[in-house]
Structures are given as C-alpha cells and as structure tokens.
Image (cartoon, grey):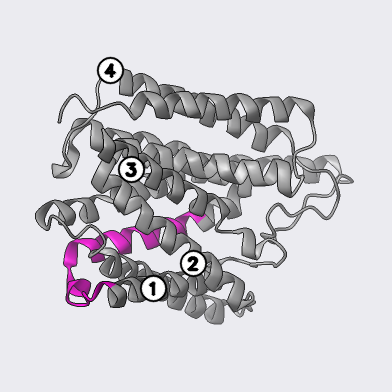
Amino acid sequence: MTNTLDGIAYACFSACAFGSMYVPMKKYPIYDGVRFQLYMCTGILLVGLTCSVLDGDLASAAAFGPLLGGGLNGIANFLLLRLVDLLGIGVGYSLFHFAGLPMGYLIGRLGLWGVPRAGDALADCGAGVVLLSFTLLSMIRNADICEGDDYHGTRFEYPLISGSLDVREEKETLSRQRTAKAIAIPLALASGAMSAISNVPVTLWNLDHPGRPLAPILPMYTGIWLASVVLSLFHEVTCRILGVESASPRRSPALACGAIWGIGYAGFVMAIHLAGFEASFVIGCIGSILVSGFLSVFWFKEVHSCRSRFLFSLAFALQVAGVLLMARPDPLK
C-alpha cells in the first residue's frame, strides 16, 4: 500500500509538471512549432544527461528499448503539432489525450506487450470516472473560448477566420474544416496511441533491471531528441524546396519547457515503477489536463463563464474520486 501511495504521489508530481510545462512559453509565439519542439527536446536531453551523471550510470544510454520508446514519443509529439495546426490547441490536445488515454489504461489492465497486469473492476470504475472528468474538461476548452480578434490560444500562430466572409468563402471554409476533421481523426488515433506505447519499453527495461528505475531516462530522452532532429531536418529541407521561411521561437523558454517535461517524466517513470502502468498513465494524462485547466481558469483568467468554472470544479472532484478508486492495494499483486 505504501508503494502504491508513493507511486500516486509521483504520478501527481508528473501531472503538475506536464500541465505547467508550457507556462514559460505563454508570452512568446512558437510559430509552426517545429523549431520549438527541437529546442524543447534539447532541454529534455540535458535533463537526461544531468540525471545520468548524478546517478553515475552513463552505460545505459545505449539501451535499445528505451531509445526506441523515445523515438516513438518524439514522433507522437510531432504529429500532435500537426493535429493542433488542423484543429487548434484546445480541440487538438483534447482529441490527442482522448485517443491516448484508453490505450494507456488497456496496456496495464490487460498486460499488453509484457507489461504486468493490474487493476480490478473498481479500478475500471475509477478509470471511467476519470474519463468522465476528461469529457467535462473538453467541454470547457471548447465552450469557453476567449473573445477578441487577436486571440491565438497559447500563442500558436494560425490565421484567424474573419467574421465578414461572403457566402462562397464561408462554404469554402466549411469544406476545409470538414477536410481537417477527416484528417485529424486518424492523426489523433496514431499520435495518442504512439504516445501511450512509447512508455512500454521503459517499463519493460525496468522489469529486467530491478532497482534502477531512472536508468532508462537517458536513452529515452536521447531517442526523443534524435527523432526531433530528424523531423526538424526534414521540415527545413521541405521549407527550402517550397521557398517557405520558417521562423524561430525564443530558445531559452523552449529549453525551460523541455526541462520541466524531463523532470516530470522522471517522476512518471517512478510512478510506473511503484504504482503500476495503468493508474500512473491515467493520473498523469488526466492530471496534466486538470493542472493546465487550473492555470487557465485561476491564473491566466482565460475562462470567464460561471458554467465553465462549475464544470472545472466538478471535473476536479471526479478526478479525485477516480484516483482514490485506483489507488487501492492492487488485488493482482
């Protein structure tokens, strides 16, 4: 029971880090997001190097499994940028997590790919309650959009649709929106599933090397960085061929975002080690959305309506109830 509670605490810590990691970039544009991802992944790699140096274990950097998992994670984040480009930051991130959450829970619940099975019917109920809280949070993001002609979400710079379009332009806009949604659904399924599966190699590596839960951090982060480099090079070459300029965001805030994510993921790995895969993934996924929603409502004041504030409070209560159901001693252990 003590290990489970410690794991839940680590999962909550990682959720706080994941939910607040974009705060350093709040006041700065990230443009198309590709160079931002490269700088952010560099910050992630620096955290991995620091952890390995402090741990005195650089030999594990060549572990293939975690390296592969990091590559999948980097590709998933790149696809997420394209998803946000199509649907916007609120709907895009919501759809991404909606696709990844069931996959992450089922991996641990059913014991897929060698991950130890865990959980029972009450844990399933807890996951369902947490998923319901996610649905409420999605309603907040979609229903309470800040007003103003210059609103750009979290500073992703995408063209805004003017309110003075004629009928023909409106039909063309609706057609583009339908096309975007048709592309976004498989994109969300792919990116969300890849994000969940990317954690499996690290979990399996820790099972084969007990007592060293943070050892696969460096190869995981190296894989993320390598995937980001390859995809960024591909993007730059494509832009040059098409004659399109790619603007560069500020480096230091992006590095800070990566460092926060890297520290949070280290806590997430500890959570999996102590509390199991399915509970840690659900808490980390939903908790990060909850934390980002908390910052949006109470710090940045981006949510104004009483209805959305009520939905947020209800989602928070459901989140706590679901976590308590999943935090019980695992009957399969």
Residue 70: x %, y % from top left: 31, 62
Main secondary structure found in the magenta portion: helix
Q: Quadrant of residue 205?
A: bottom left
Task: Please tell me which of labels 2 and 1 falls first in the chain.
Answer: 1
Task: Please tell me which of labels 3 and 2 falls first in the chain.
Answer: 3
Identity of the residue furthest to the front in this view: 2
> Which is in the foreground here, disc 3 or disc 1?
3
Task: Please tell me which of labels 3 and 1 falls first in the chain.
Answer: 3
**Residue holding disc 1:** 45
Q: Which mark is residue 6?
A: 3
- Helix, strand or loop at label 4? It is helix
Which amino acid type is marked by label 2? Gly
Q: Are marks 4 and 2 in contact (CB under 8 Å)?
A: no
- Category of crowding for the residue at label 2, using alpha-carbon neighbours closer than 10 angstroms: few (below 14), some (14–19), many (at least 20): many
Residue 73, compared with residue 9, is above or below; it is below
Q: Which sits in the foreground, 62 or 322?
A: 322
Q: Which residues are magenta?
A: 55-80
Separation of disc 3 and disc 2 at Cα? 25 Å
Residue 320, compared with residue 40, is above or below; it is above
Separation of disc 4 and disc 3 at Cα? 22 Å
Q: Quadrant of residue 233?
A: bottom left
Q: Quadrant of the C terminus?
A: top left
Separation of disc 2 and disc 1 at Cα? 8 Å
Q: Residue at x 70, y 52 (%)?
A: 153
Residue 307: x %, y % from top left: 74, 25
Task: Please tell me which of labels 4 and 3 falls first in the chain.
Answer: 3
The answer to whether any part of residue 185 appears in the image is no
> Which is in the foreground here, disc 4 or disc 3?
3
Q: Which mark is residue 258?
A: 2
